[in-house]
Amino acid sequence: MASLISCPHCGTRPKEEFSIRGDAAPVRPAPLAADEVWHDYVHLRANPRGRIREHWQHVAGCRRWLVVERDNFTHEVFAVLDAAAERGGAQ
Amino acid sequence: MRYSALSIFKQALAGNLGWKPVWREPEPKPHYDVVIVGGGGHGLATAYYLAREFGIRNVAVVEKGYLGSGNVGRNTTIVRSNYMLPGNEPFYEFSLKLWEGLERELNYNVMLSQRGIISLYHNDGQRDHYTRRGNAMMMEGVAAEQLDRETLKKMLPFLNFDHARFPIIGGLLQRRAGTARHDAVAWGFARGADRLGVDLIQNCEVTGIRRENGVVTGVETTKGFIGCNRLALAAAGNSSRVGEMAGLKLPLESHVLQAFVTEGLKPCIDHVITYGAGHFYISQSDKGGLVFGAEIDGYSSYAQRGNLATAEHVMEEGVTMIPGLSRVRVLRAWGGVMDMSMDGSPIIDRTSIENLYLNCGWCYGGFKATPASGFCFAHLIAKGESHHVARALRLDRFERGFPIDEAGAGTQPNLH
Ligand SMILES: Cc1cc2nc3c(=O)[nH]c(=O)nc-3n(C[C@H](O)[C@H](O)[C@H](O)COP(=O)(O)OP(=O)(O)OC[C@H]3O[C@@H](n4cnc5c(N)ncnc54)[C@H](O)[C@@H]3O)c2cc1C
Ligand SMILES: [Zn+2]
């Protein structure tokens, strides 16, 4: 169940502490990318059934952005990673 | 059999043994003029109006489960047209007008009950918002009334008027709004469509969409290939999955919405009431159960069940609004999967693929739309152009920069 999310920084917390941004797959295009590319990014979603990766923010905790990997049919959570670390960026 | 007081009386005398199934169980024909994917309210209404209004009777509705097993049988049955934006209000009002004639039209008791919907507000900003919404309704010729705190206290004495954070200061009332029996709506349209020759094919899942030279020629199903001239998708929460079969990527995310019903009580809540401080809405069913729900669970989901944390949140909101609710037992909870669109408004349109038509994005407000959705979708399929009240609901509105963002939440489906 997605009632509990294990934040890599704060431990296992109720989902109410998090706000959910949605699908982590879309990648923000370059500012001057073509309109169709922006349309795709802003509006269109693959919306798969099964294993997905989503952006959640631990707003009532460390306030870090996280990537939650879970199954949106069984509600099983497989992994929760810090979004910046996940991207290979600096903390 | 046409239903009438006499037919019911005769059946009663005969021990109610003479009732017959109200639709056939046909095997699919190799080819239809129109195949509709999804035997929910919208698919069935589309089939009905295609046959009744536009004379296209060689139609099949293909449903993976049983008719009405989707959201049409899972919703909280609220019917209203108190929308604000010009792209929405005329459409939902057209729908409410169809509702008002539906029982006569279908010769079926859909138990439309125009008990009125009251949307409560708690601060000046919200009052201004609801005043604006009421005005927007009146500009489309739809009656709306504002009720002050004293009037509400007499009408709804069980509300928590003196809540420290969310005192109730007034409400917007649409008297013609109310509820309808959800299953009966599906059954009424199904019976109507069947009688006009539409084939309703149950337990038949669409698994693929066949195209030749880019043109849709039919669907692969668990009962074999079914050819068609035009294919109409009305698959509610599974629109993305079905759309993908034709290579479509849609502005949708699937989310779960939960609802609840309590033990049966004597009549106590006369209206549909919505709680502006949260997102809670409640009404009393004709059997006496209190039917209520609130927001979606927040994250994408294809599970027809929600999580307990959201259930708890819903109960908290309910009890904040009606303290007495805390003493009522909840009998059942369930969830439905809905396709949340990027602007919170629906899509009725053709697609970039020839012969492929799309009806989706109803979020959690599509039950009230059932008749108009069916009518406008049938209009589009039959005439090749949008019905005038559905023109703003086209798919390309996102690309063109004309979203219909009723909630003002932006392109974030879990906030609508
Ligand atoms: C808990 C809840 C409360 C709600 N409350 C309200 C309310 O008070 N008022 C309101 O206006 N709206 C409400 N809604 C929204 C409303 O129920 C939906 O928007 C509306 O019912 C959707 O249209 P439909 O009836 O055609 O969908 P459905 O009944 O879901 O029909 C779609 C059908 O497509 C079928 N299907 C899917 N994929 C395939 C396939 N591959 N092959 C064959 N068939 C397929 C499904 O089995 C399903 O039967 C609520 C929804 C929920 C979940
Ligand atoms: Zn944290």
Image (cartoon, coloured by chain):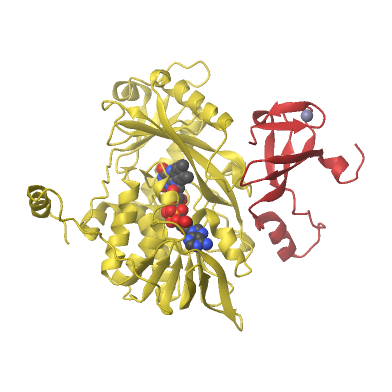
Instruction: Please say if B247 is above or below B128.
Output: below
Quadrant in which residue B44 is drawn: bottom left
Say whether residue A65 is left or right of residue B168: right
Of residues B386 and B169, which is closer to you in this image?
A: B386
Q: How many marks?
A: 0
Q: Write down the colour of chain B.
A: yellow
Say whether residue B146 is left or right of residue A59: left
Instruction: Please say if B111 is above or below A10.
Output: below
Quarter of the picture holding the C terminus of chain B: top right
Q: Residue at x 26, y 55 (%)?
A: B102
Q: Residue at x 56, y 63 (%)?
A: B242
Measuring from the top left, give residue A52's x and y in whole percent.
70, 49
Measuring from the top left, give residue B172's x and y in whole percent.
39, 35
Measuring from the top left, give residue B235's x and y in whole percent.
49, 59
Say whether residue B371 is left or right of residue B352: left
Residue B303 appears in view? yes
Measuring from the top left, give residue B187's x and y in whole percent.
31, 55
Of residues B404 and B160, which is closer to you in this image?
A: B160
Which chain: red?
Answer: A
Of residues A41 and B5, which is closer to you in this image?
A: B5
Residue B53 appears in view? no
Quarter of the picture holding the N terminus of chain B: bottom left
The residue at the far bottom in this view is B213
Instruction: Please say if B222 is above or below B121.
Output: below
The residue at the far right in this view is A90
